[in-house]
Image: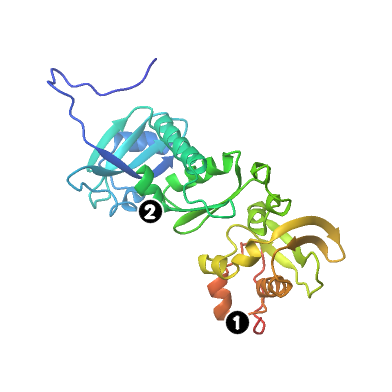
Amino acid sequence: MNFKARFERKASAPEVTDADIVGVVTLNQAQFAWFSERLLDDYDFIADYAKETYDDGERKHCLLVLGEGEDDGILVCSEGSFYARYSAYLPKARQILRDEIHRVAELIIKGRFGETENGSWVIGFDDIKEHFDLTVSPTNGIGEMLLGELEAQEEVGAVIATEDCFEISEYLQNAPEDASASEKLLTVFSLMGCNLEDVHLLDADEEHEVATIVELNRNTLTDEGKRDWSDVLAAKVERIYDGAYGTQIEVSGCPAHRLRDFSFALAGYCSEEQWSRWFNEPTANTEAPTMGGQA
């Protein structure tokens, strides 16, 4: 087994410091080679974490810098500066990080942390820090890795990352054996992980007006939108088929007028204030709807 390590001559005891990783940055090979030999230069990626890397007297809060194709990494505690004021070489850093994130993902699912009554999970990033001592945010590198690990769990149907939590829905085949047929159905929330385009929501039993939903994915709704339209997101998917309107998603468990209002709001038939409260801006390839009247 071969790896790199730093040795001290005639040390009576190893000199070590407790460290907490608050973010992960991955550089390409050339950038990492340059950085590894010029730790005292200023770097934008260190500046991005200048306020988050510090020594609180008990441990150093650090940025982990990795290189593409590299196993090892470098811990940086800049203490407000834009260079590696304090640094430490961490052998096998990539594998250590992967193993820890995989362990946390399994515990979140198998331990049912944040489970709700309908078999889904909502677990806040603060809760992950408290229970597992893992610092997570949507953009700190760790959040993206944990999202991928959660999506890879066989029990998981879909995962949506918000600004402060993960919303996780269970894969339908993992429903309890004694669950009713309706309890084993996918929800609209689960389907959002499939990046839906040009679809139509219809009530399974009652006819109602229909509007085309141009785009519906994990980033479509704001946190407030997910709360205000939670009944629509929890609707059970009975079937998906090509119908008179195109791709139609027939659902149950939600009032027909709510399905109609949700679809029309997404089509722009709501006030600008409602739109900004409920929905994020569409992706670059999707034309934003024109705001209509009150839904």
Q: Is residue 6 above or below residue 218?
A: above
Q: In the image, residue 60 lies at what x, y percent?
A: 24, 43
What quarter of the picture does the N terminus occupy? top left
What quarter of the picture does the C terminus occupy? bottom right
Compare residues 238 and 176 and report the one nearer the observer: 176
Coloration of the structure image: rainbow
Give the amino acid at mark 2. Answer: Asp
Q: In the image, residue 245 lies at what x, y percent?
A: 83, 66
Residue at (79% x, 61% y) in the render: 248
Compare residues 232 and 65 and report the one nearer the observer: 232
Q: Which secondary structure, mark 2? A: helix
Residue at (64% x, 61% y) in the render: 234
Mark 1 = which residue?
271
Residue 126, labelled with which disc?
Answer: 2
Give the mark nearer the N terminus: 1 vs 2.
2
Front tag of 1 and 2: 2
Compare residues 204 and 197 and report the one nearer the observer: 204
Task: Report the side of 186 relative to 97 (left or right).
Answer: right
Q: In the image, residue 136 lies at what x, y percent?
A: 41, 49
Say if residue 280 shows up in the picture.
no
Task: Compute the Cα span from label 1 to label 2.
Answer: 34 Å
Residue at (64% x, 71% y) in the render: 288
Number of dots carrying numbers: 2
Residue at (25% x, 37% y) in the render: 87
Residue 54, labelled with which disc?
Answer: none
Q: In the image, residue 75 lies at what x, y percent?
A: 30, 38
Give the amino acid at mark 1. Answer: Ser
Compare residues 181 and 95 and report the one nearer the observer: 181
Q: Which secondary structure, mark 1? A: loop
Image quadrant where residue 88 sits:
top left
> Quick one: label 2, few (<14), some, or many (20+) residues within 10 Å?
some
Say if residue 213 shows up in the picture.
yes
